[in-house]
Image (cartoon, rainbow, N blue to C red):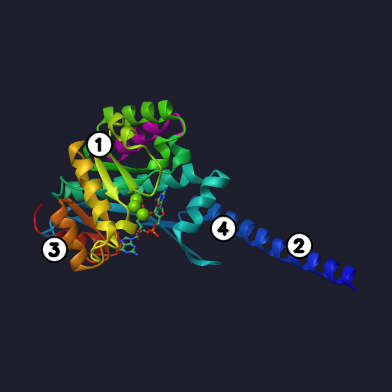
Amino acid sequence: HAKTLGKGQFQFYTESLNVAARERLALDSALRQAIEQDGLHVVYQPKVGAHGQLYGFEALVRWDSEAFGSVSPARFIPLAEENGLIGHLTWFVLRHACHQAATWRAQGHGHLRVAVNISPSLFREKDLAALVQSVLDAAGLPPENLELEITEGMLMGDVQRALAVLKELKAMGVFIAIDDFGTGYSSLAYLKRFPIDILKVDRSFVMECDLGNEAVAITRAIVSLAHSLNLRVVAEGVETASQLAVLNALGCEEFQGYLFAKPLPGPEAAAFLDAAPAA
Ligand code: C2E
Ligand code: MG
Ligand code: MG
Ligand code: MG
């Protein structure tokens, strides 16, 4: 009897594994199709100063799939990194973001930076700088209007390679931001060696900043470290006025989060832009 049960269980597990594998495969090919057929779109979340001045937007990719509904980037970005689609996806987002920024520039908003997330795997490609330059050229966007958000993990691993690519990008004139800072393992000493402009404090610290606990102490340390290295500090995921008050008192220069706006489709971002006080 035990044998039969064991066999049945085994069958059950292979069944569910097959279901998961099949769904993954279907998701994979749907994503491939979405990328090829313009099925993705880009939304823009404002980054503002304490008085609502607008400094720029972070471009975030969205996928509304016919078969899967709206799929979170937290789910499909890792998939795209595994199946090799991340290059195409990033190129798509870069093109849209740079075109959007060029349009805003032409409308008199020449100071705005648009930020694009760059995946670690892409960072290892040797032609990243060339790709970025070609997109800037095609959009007619000056490099100082583009910011690239990379994560700490990228600074680990092949440090020499990361340094070389960053220097190339920096020489072009684009801004470099470290995203989700505080969640990785990068040595603080590394920060000094890399040509970085901006540090984004991770939402997990921001979230707890109004609780008066150790998150405030950590955030204070991050901000003071950043400022001693001449970096601008952006707080991500700001949701409440009391978080904003604490972060502002700590000296953060820019704020991004639902307190100000969710990521917005292009036309709504333009409306936000028109309503914001001059930076
Ligand atoms: P991220 O770069 O740290 O982006 C910030 C995420 O926090 C976004 O989620 C944004 O919608 C969310 N967020 C912003 N403000 C708030 C807030 O006040 N409260 C809360 N709870 N969340 C807030 P999203 O768009 O789902 O993106 C998740 C992650 O997916 C991003 O984290 C980024 O790592 C990745 N991602 C998104 N778009 C792209 C892309 O175009 N390329 C690459 N490589 N990765 C992307
Ligand atoms: Mg980001
Ligand atoms: Mg972030
Ligand atoms: Mg984050």
Q: What kind of element bears circle 2? A: helix
State which tag comes first along the sequence, 2 or 1. 2
Residue that carries the numbered disc 4 in the rendered image = 30
Identity, as a three-letter code, of the amino acid under mark 4: Ala
Callout 3: 10 Å neighbours few (<14), some, many (20+)? few
Q: Of the two numbered discs 3 and 1 on the same chain, state the one appearing first in sequence.
A: 1
Type of amino acid under label 1 = Pro
Q: Which residue is mark 3?
A: 275
Q: Position of residue 249 (x, y in %)?
A: 13, 56
Answer with the quarter of the image where residue 228 lies: top left
Give the mark nearest the N terminus, 4 or 1: 4
Q: Which residue is mark 2?
A: 14
Magenta stretch: includes residue 60: no
Mark 3–mark 2 CB contact (< 8 Å)? no
Numbered label attached to residue 143: 1
Specify whether tag 2 is near ligand 1 (CB below 8 Å).
no
* Magenta segment: 124-139
- Which residue is found at the position 32% from the left and 37% from the top? 188
Instruction: Compare residues 247 and 40 and report the one nearer the observer.
Output: 247
